Image: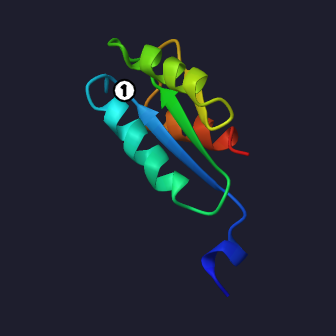
């Protein structure tokens, strides 16, 4: 049995807090890695009340990759644990 026989799709959930500088490269590399799979995938980015441009980067990535990148933007910082739980609750 191969891995693709066991897994029907892949969801990556990433909490984000003030990652404006690293976020574009993270998104690029993650999409490249997921794109090499023979499975449907999604990348869910949860902005945990960032004060930099992270929310804008997430929104742009979601517009540029509809149905693949999904963004959740918190209005304030709730903490990494809550960001991950929220992202997991939104996986398909």
Relative to 39, is 80 above or below? above
Relative to 5, is 65 above or below? above
User: How was the colour assigned to the protein in this rendering?
Assistant: rainbow
Q: In the rendered image, which quarter contains the C terminus?
A: top right
Q: Few, some or many C-alpha atoms within 10 Å of disc 1 (few <14, some 14-19, many ≥20)?
A: many
Residue 15: where, in percent of width, then height? 45, 36
Residue 28: where, in percent of width, then height? 40, 39
Q: Most extreme residue toward the left, as rendered?
A: 21
Residue 47: where, in percent of width, then height? 47, 24
The answer to whether 3 appears left or right of 57 in the picture is: right
The answer to whether 77 appears left or right of 59 in the picture is: left
Task: Tell me which corner region of the image, top left, top right, bottom left or bottom right, holds residue 65.
Answer: top right
Task: Tell me which corner region of the image, top left, top right, bottom left or bottom right, holds residue 7.
Answer: bottom right
Residue 67 seen in the figure: yes
Name the residue rendered at 54%, 48% in the picture: 12
Residue 82 seen in the figure: no
Q: Most extreme residue toward the bottom, as rendered?
A: 1
Q: Circle 1 sits on which residue?
A: 17
Name the residue rendered at 41%, 30% in the picture: 16
Residue 49: where, in percent of width, then height? 44, 17
Relative to 71, is 49 above or below? above
Number of numbered labels in the structure image: 1
User: Foreground: 86 or 16?
Assistant: 16
User: Foreground: 29 or 12?
Assistant: 29
Q: In the rendered image, which quarter contains the N terminus?
A: bottom right
Name the residue rendered at 26%, 25% in the picture: 21
Task: Tell me which corner region of the image, top left, top right, bottom left or bottom right, holds residue 90.
Answer: top right
Mark 1 lies on a secondary structure that is loop
Name the residue rendered at 45%, 24% in the picture: 48
């Amino acid at each position: 049995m191969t891995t693709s026989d066991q897994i029907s799709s892949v969801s990556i959930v990433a909490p984000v807090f003030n990652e404006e500088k690293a976020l574009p490269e993270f998104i690029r590399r993650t999409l490249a890695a997921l794109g090499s799979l023979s499975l449907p995938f999604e990348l869910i980015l949860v902005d945990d009340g960032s004060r930099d441009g992270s929310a804008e980067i997430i929104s742009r990535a979601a517009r540029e990759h509809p149905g693949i990148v999904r963004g959740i933007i918190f209005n304030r910082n709730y903490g990494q644990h809550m960001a991950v739980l929220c992202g997991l609750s939104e996986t398909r």
